[in-house]
Amino acid sequence: MKKKVGFIGLGIMGKPMAMNLLKAGFNLVVFSRSKRPVEDLVKEKALSANSPKEVAERSEVLITMLPDSPEVQEVILGKDGVIQGIKPGSVVIDMSSINPLVTQEIAKVLKEKEVKMLDAPVSGGESGAVQGTLAIMVGGEEKVFNDCMEIFKAMGKNIVHVGEIGAGGFVKLVNQIIVALNIAAVGEAFTLGVKAGLDPQVIYQAIRGGLAGSSVLETKAPMIFGRNFKPGFKIRLHHKDLKNALSTAKDLGVPLPLSSLVQQFLISLMTDGRGDEDHSALATFFEKMARVEIKSIT
């Protein structure tokens, strides 16, 4: 018999993830501050709750998918939070991208209530959430991870247990650094090519099969060429992830000079009012300086 699952946080990523759990046959209880996604999921047979506490009372496994560390702390540990209603033996899976040191502190508090916790941030953007093909990096006890595998399989394809609690968050920070720096490199390089009078589509075809080829290039270059910055993953959220990476690195004594530089580019774009655009719009930071636009000539 499938576990009773609660889901809190129904944004760009959370709503399709919750929808895939429903499609997989899970009994789902949902809560979000925004009413519309709750109403949409209720139409698909989900049940609604009035608070995180109520979701916890009605769930065996509870998933959170929230913007950042303060929101996760408030929803799990705050007034009318998860901790107020959760039963011993339950599992909390935080799939948000937050500071892993905060995750570890939350897990300690939940442990006092005899509640297990997994941190399981994801990669793949909105399209991966919709298609159920997310990469999921999971930290926590391996037995708990195995017990929740059916839930993870409803939302993702590449599901890897990466270590103890907090390890998922650390791996996600590694992922986000690599993605941000890749997008910045694509933007800077193609700006040079366009300024030299070349067609970016021709450059793309020439380099995609070589060492410069990457998932970032395949996914983001066509968006840049098409001036399509509809968010699959917002600039302001990637800025948040780099902020968490830099904060965690400071605590661990690890210098991140390139990440720090790219974070400044993201801040500049946010100041220009572009924080809700897709992170592929990072390329426009370089375009603006060079006074060109990366789009196909033909």
Image: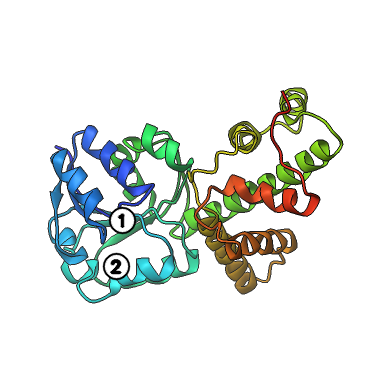
Furthest residue toward bottom: 79
Q: Could you tell me the amino acid type at mark 1?
A: Gly
Residue 101: % across, % down: 49, 68
250 to 124, vertically: above or below: below
Identify the mark nearer the N-term, 2 or 1: 1
Residue 20 visible in the current orientation: yes
Residue lying at 76% horizontally and 46% vertically, measured from the top left: 188
Q: Residues within 10 Å of mark 2 (few under 14, many from 20)?
A: many
Residue 44: % across, % down: 16, 38
Q: Which mark is residue 75?
A: 2
Considering the image in quadrants, where does the C terminus appear? top right
Q: Could you tell me the amino acid type at mark 2?
A: Val
Label 2 with label 1: CB-CB less than 8 Å: yes
Q: Which quadrant of the structure image shows residue 218? A: top right
Q: Is residue 194 left or right of residue 122?
A: right
- Element type at marker 2? helix
Choose mark 2 or mark 1, whichever is in front: 1
Q: Which quadrant of the structure image shows residue 201? A: top right
> Rounded to the nearest whole Å, what is the CA distance between mark 2 and mark 1?
10 Å
Q: Which residue is mark 1?
A: 9
Residue 108: % across, % down: 36, 71
